[in-house]
Image: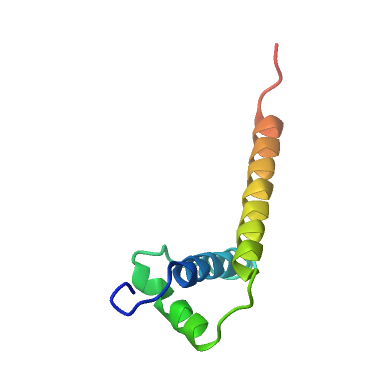
Amino acid sequence: WFQRGVSLSVIETALLLASLRRLARPPDLPPLPRIRSLAYFQPVVEELLAHPVPEGYLDYLRFKLQRVLDQAASKDAHTSRCSMPPHR
């Protein structure tokens, strides 16, 4: 991407967008394999180069990811509290 002159903001947007798309998959679908390489994000980089996102979209994606992470942390905290044996 460096050799092609792809901006860091396009790369960050691609990483966030692809990650959020994975996280938003319906839970009843089979799980996707782990991401093993940055090559996974290449189609999203190409998509963003062909169709640039509006200004502020990167901030929106950052906000969305933070909400997902906060919800997961809250869910984990609730699960760990509920699964602990009673204190004696």
Please tell me in which quadrant of the rendered image residue 84 appears.
top right
User: Quick check: 34 left or right of 54?
Assistant: left
Residue 25 seen in the figure? no
Task: Inspect this view and state whether residue 44 appears.
Answer: yes
**21 and 13: which is toward the camera:** 13
Q: In which image quadrant can residue 2 be found?
A: bottom left
Query: Is residue 32 left or right of 62 when viewed as pictured?
Result: left
Q: Quadrant of the N terminus?
A: bottom left
Image location of residue 28, percent across then percent down: 63, 68
Quarter of the image with the C terminus is: top right
Q: Which residue is at 69% across, 30% downward?
A: 81
User: In the picture shown, does residue 71 fall above or below 64?
Assistant: above
Splitting the image into 4 quarters, where does residue 23 fall? Answer: bottom right
In this rendered view, identify the residue nearer to me: 5 or 31: 5
Across and down, in percent, residue 53 comes to 60, 78
Q: Which is more toward the observer, 50 or 85?
A: 50
